[in-house]
Image (cartoon, rainbow, N blue to C red):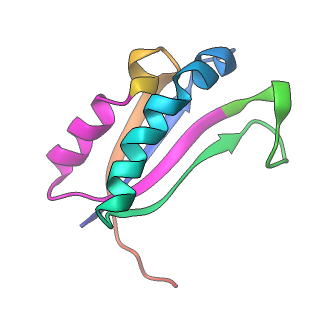
């Protein structure tokens, strides 16, 4: 089943986000290579795909896991969380309808 992982950034965390990005992306790449990643990306802090110094307010990942517990465990081990980029993460089941 798919699960939505919505994470909220701490204020002024852009520098930490940029420093931790390679480790964060490496974990997503593993999901992608296993065919389990539906989508992933950051949430710009302004109406632009390149927000520059404004940074981001969080991230969204939708990926396939065996259970809610497994999805939560994966989210709990995100390098962004360990680095203090994320202050809150919500994991919920997701039913893909379209496209």
Residue 96 screen position, x and y as percent: 40, 75
- Residue 55 drawn at (x, y percent): 74, 29
71 magenta-colored:
yes
Q: Is residue 3 visible?
A: no
Residue at 52% in and 23% down: 20
Residue at 46% in and 25% down:
80
Residue 46 is inside the magenta segment:
no
Q: Is residue 60 above or below residue 16?
A: below
Residue 51 is drawn in which quadrant?
Answer: top right
Position of the N terminus, as image quadrant, is bottom left
Can residue 27 be seen from the camera position used here?
A: yes
**Left or right side of 3 for 70:** left
Q: How many marks?
A: 0
User: What are the residue bounds of the magenta stretch?
Assistant: 57-78
Q: Foreground: 22 or 95?
A: 22
Residue 74 is situated, as x and y percent measured from the top left of the image, at 26, 39
């Amino acid at each position: 089943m798919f699960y939505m992982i919505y994470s909220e950034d701490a204020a002024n965390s852009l520098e930490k986000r940029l420093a931790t990005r390679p480790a964060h992306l490496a974990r997503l790449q593993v999901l992608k290579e296993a065919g389990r990643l539906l989508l992933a990306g950051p949430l710009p802090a302004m109406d632009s795909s390149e927000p520059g110094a404004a940074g981001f307010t969080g991230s969204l990942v939708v990926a396939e896991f065996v259970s809610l517990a497994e999805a939560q465990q994966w989210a709990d081990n995100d390098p962004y969380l360990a680095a203090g980029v994320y202050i809150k993460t919500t994991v919920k089941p997701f039913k893909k309808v379209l496209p």
